[in-house]
Image (cartoon, rainbow, N blue to C red):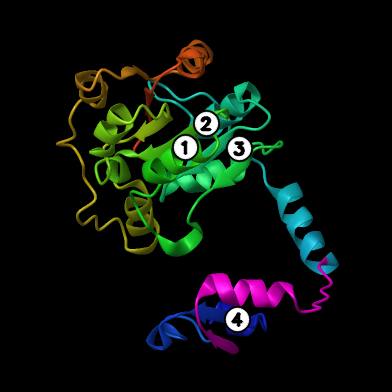
Amino acid sequence: LEIARRGIQIIHIDIDPAEIGKNVGTAVPLVGNAKIVLRQLLDCEITTNTAEWREELSALKAQYCPDLAPRQNFINPKAFLRLLSEKLDEDAVYVADVGQNQIWAANHLVIKQHRFLTTGGMGTMGYSLPAAMGAKLAAPQRQVVASCGDGSFQMMMMELATMCQHNVPVKIVLFCNDKLGMVKEIQQNSYGKRYIATSLEGNPSFVQLAKAYGIGAEEISSLDEAPAAIHRMLGEPGCYLLCCRVDPDESSI
């Protein structure tokens, strides 16, 4: 409905014709291998005027007033990511998983010359660690950091074995709130706090889990601890997991 209201036209490329227009109304359906179709599009002379869109984005950015205040007994993830951005190499690769960690990164990670990888709105939890390993193998000389929540981490934590077996030194920032944070926030704001299947209070000790693989790991619960912890993580030549305790009621925005 929002797409129709704003007059947005969708070009949908998919090798499976059954998927075309399945979830979103499609103005231009293109059935085919995306790699081939995109190459053909590059050969077309397409001109666009993005001035109005850039102005809208600039206005939204100017209106945004982030809450960067310290949290009692927890990490403020928004302030943490801004601090992490200052310490990352210019050409670092940052891979965000799905959920609140993804929104925090999109709003607060400062992009310099490095890359920000995420799945957008596709909702593929468990994406970040495999994607980060792929990025590290493709560019072994660059820093690669994966961020995730405790929900998505438990969908891919077996990849710690892959990291160790193949010596892929990825750094992991794990935002742990013992909840499926994005789902909880939606249920809180839109469904009268009727929480269903959002608790992860049976979580293991992620630090001990990482150490069982021989991976360096630590947990922090205060922004005062963050600078030294980030220094240790980025200075570690091998894999590292930094678990950040986050308030279960921390908002995405």
Report which residue position mark 3 lands on: 109
Mark 2 or 4 closer to N-term?
A: 4
Residue type, mark 3 in image: Leu
In the rendered structure, are the residues bearing label 2 and label 1 in contact, judged by CB atoms less than 8 Å apart?
yes
Report which residue position mark 1 lands on: 137
Residue type, mark 4 in image: Ile
- The label shown at residue 250 is none
Nearer to us of marks 3 and 2 is 2
C-alpha span from label 3 to label 2: 22 Å
Q: Residue at x 59, y 24 (%)?
A: 83
* 246 w.r.t. 49: above or below: above
Disc 1 element:
helix
* 40 w.r.t. 207: above or below: below
C-alpha span from label 2 to label 4: 36 Å
* 223 w.r.t. 248: above or below: above
Mark 3 or 2 closer to N-term?
A: 3
In the rendered structure, are the residues bearing label 1 and label 4 in contact, judged by CB atoms less than 8 Å apart?
no
Where residue 63 appears, as percent x and y from the top left, is 72, 50
Where residue 127 appears, as percent x and y from the top left, is 38, 49
The stretch of residues the image draws in magenta is 27-50
Report which residue position mark 2 lands on: 140
C-alpha span from label 4 to label 3: 28 Å
| Label 2, residues with CA under 10 Å away: few <14, some 14-19, many ≥20 | some
Q: Residue at x 81, y 78 (%)?
A: 45
Disc 4 element:
loop
Mark 4 or 3 closer to N-term?
A: 4
Report which residue position mark 4 lands on: 10
Q: State left or right for residue 209 relative to residue 81.
A: left
Nearer to us of marks 4 and 3 is 4
